[in-house]
Image (tube, rainbow, N blue to C red):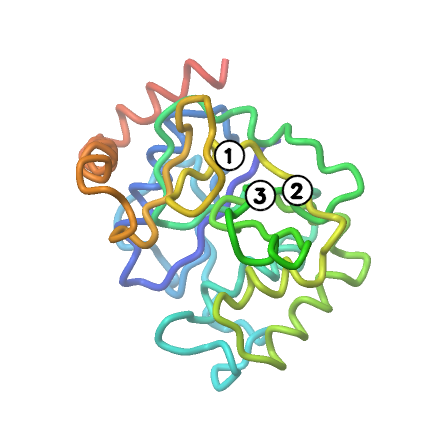
Amino acid sequence: MKHAVYTGTRNIYGDMETAAKSLIANSDVDVVHFLIEDAEFSSQLPGIIECRDVSDQDLFPYDGPNVKSRFTYMALMRAALFRVFPDLDKVLSLDCDTVAVRDCSAAWNVDLDGCYFAAVQEKWPLRRRGLQYCNVGVTLMNLDMLRDGKGDEIIALINSHGYGWPEQDAMNYLCQGRIAEMPAYYNATPWTVGSTEPDRIIHFAAEKSWPTEILAEKKRHERFYREMTWEEVIERHAKWAR
């Protein structure tokens, strides 16, 4: 089965719902998980979505070096998905500011053999030092392999040292040589490598980095899925899930 997960504090539940609508409408995903900080979500959701209250988590101390206004413990939870979902082998993790605009069913088929995760390469940071650095806004996580001890190392590093992009930095630093590169059209941002194929998932982080005319067009996609009803979403999903 194909599983996807979004994590977020209650102030971004609306973005989470929009992101999930777009993914469900454009893939054959079987289950979408919402990791939230409430017993129930703020609106009624279809059966394909499962919500889990993780506000009682004890993995990332609230006074830890990376739990602050910019990054909450909810954002860090993606680094602990191997524990949150002990029965899953892999899961597609997505930021709540992503929007799927074309069929992305094949994202779960990216080859993870021998790799801890697959993600889209960024253009600059660690390449200058000969290191691989990927953006984890859309990440296929090899949960089974992360249970070899590497997942625990990532959590420990996040809890011991402050980073600019906590879970992303820790995952990239500790998994060098075991990171699979995902096709760039699954995480289209101004700073990820470009693709000759049309975007499949657009990532709206750092919106000021987008050229105005391109951002306006991409925002049109976001509005489209935000306004789509769940009935319409499930109807579109049915053609991929057959």
Amino acid type, residue under disc 3 in the picture: Ala
Label 3 to label 1: alpha-carbon separation: 8 Å
Could you tell me which residue is drawn at 50 percent across and 73 percent down? 56
To which residue does mark 2 refer?
90
| Left or right of 37 in this view: 126 | right
**Which residue sits at x=50%, y=76%?**
66
Q: CA distance from mark 1 to mark 2?
A: 20 Å
**Disc nearer the start of the sequence (1/2):** 2
Residue 139 in picture, x, y percent from top left? 56, 45
Which mark is drawn over residue 119?
3
Name which quarter of the figure residue 156 lies in. bottom right
9 sits left or right of 57 in the view: left
Alpha-carbon neighbours of circle 1 within 10 Å: few (<14), some, or many (≥20)?
many
Left or right of 51 in this view: 84: right
**If you read the primary sequence from the N terminus, does the residue marked by circle 2 or circle 3 appear first?**
2
Mark 3 element type: strand
Residue 142's disc is none
**Residue carrying label 1:** 184
Q: Quadrant of the N terminus?
A: top right
